[in-house]
């Protein structure tokens, strides 16, 4: 008997990449950089965004799309800190966002009145690494409460990211986390990876985070 193999995944990925190209085109035309925040669950994406909205929202017009498996809790938290629409994508069990969902979210965003788009992806270091959302860059959050070898265990995510944002650095005195070893693991899979160091709880390192974001917005406007 002849066996026919249907390459469903390849077709789905091809369609996603087509939509991602359209998302990227629209963002580039509007000169709006978009950052896809990726991490393990609990690494601190939402808290970092809360502080960013509180302290940078008066200087930059920030749009946010959040992804979660079952609830819109993160979007509800973020909406308390901005007058802008925060869009929640509830994936219903899917472990990542896709370009179609981002494209749909863009329909409700006035890009002419937006300086920067954040996409808060589902907490997962595997699936989101393979899905292009049309973002300017992926930023992987790396919590000090995790193992230093996360980049070795999940290399594709760190290879796909332009920056690793260390979070919860205020906890370092209470942990055995070796920051130098963590950076070495990250650089071993992506020698070009850049690092930022933050604590959304105490504010440590947030000035550097905000400067990074403002620089990217300025670069996009000049492009």
Image (tube, grey):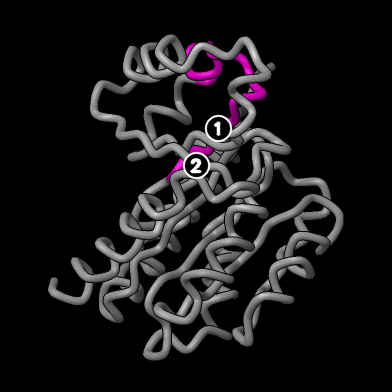
Other-residue count near label 1 (Cα within 10 Å), few / some / many at <14 / 14–19 / ≥20:
many
Is 83 rendered above or below residue 69? below
Q: Secondary structure at mark 1?
A: helix
Front position in the image: 140 or 169:
169
Farthest residue in the left direction? Answer: 222
Q: Which residue is mark 2?
A: 198
Q: Position of residue 15 (x, y in %)?
A: 48, 55
Which quadrant would residue 81 be assigned to in this image?
A: bottom right
Q: CA distance from mark 2 to mark 1?
A: 6 Å
Magenta region includes residue 147: yes
Q: Looking at the rendering, in which quadrant would you find the N terminus?
A: top right
N-term-proximal mark, 2 vs 1: 1
**The quarter of the displayed image where residue 75 is located:** bottom right
Please report contact status of discs 2 and 1: CB closer than 8 Å, yes or no: yes
**Where is residue 20 shown, x and y percent of the image?**
42, 59
> Which residues make up the magenta segment?
139-154
Estimate the x, y position of residue 112 in percent, counting from the top left. 37, 90
Tell whether 90 sits left or right of 18.
right
Other residues around mark 2 within 10 Å, as few (<14) / some (14–19) / many (≥20): many
Count the labels in the image.
2
Label ID, residue 169: 1
Q: Secondary structure at mark 2?
A: loop
Q: Is residue 170 left or right of residue 16?
A: right
Disc number for residue 126: none
Residue at the spot 52% in from the left edge and 84% down from the top edge: 109
Q: Which residue sits at x=66%, y=54%?
A: 46
Q: Is residue 139 above or below residue 119?
A: above
Residue at image position (37%, 68%) is: 22
Q: Residue 136: x percent and y percent? A: 34, 56
**Quarter of the rendering occupied by the C terminus:** bottom left
Residue 114 occupies which quadrant of the picture? bottom left
- Residue depicted at x 41% and y 71%: 116
């Amino acid at each position: 008997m002849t066996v026919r193999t249907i390459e469903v995944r390849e077709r789905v990925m091809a369609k996603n990449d087509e939509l991602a190209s359209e998302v990227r085109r629209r963002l580039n035309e509007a000169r709006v950089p978009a950052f896809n925040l990726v991490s393990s669950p609990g690494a601190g994406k939402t808290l970092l965004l809360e502080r960013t909205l509180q302290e940078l929202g008066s200087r930059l017009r920030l749009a946010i799309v959040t992804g979660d498996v079952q609830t819109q809790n993160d979007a509800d938290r973020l909406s308390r800190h901005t007058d802008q629409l925060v869009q929640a994508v509830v994936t219903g069990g899917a472990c990542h966002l896709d370009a179609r969902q981002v494209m749909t979210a863009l329909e409700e965003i006035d890009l002419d009145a937006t300086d920067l788009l954040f996409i808060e992806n589902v907490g997962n270091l595997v699936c989101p690494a393979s899905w292009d959302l049309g973002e300017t860059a992926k930023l992987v959050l790396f919590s000090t409460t995790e193992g230093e070898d996360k980049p070795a265990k999940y290399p594709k995510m760190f290879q796909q990211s332009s920056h690793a944002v260390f979070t919860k650095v205020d906890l370092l005195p209470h942990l055995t986390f070796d920051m130098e070893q963590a950076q070495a693991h990250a650089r071993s899979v992506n020698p070009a990876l850049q690092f930022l160091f933050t604590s959304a709880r105490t504010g440590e390192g947030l000035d550097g985070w905000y400067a990074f974001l403002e620089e990217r917005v300025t670069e996009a406007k000049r492009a």
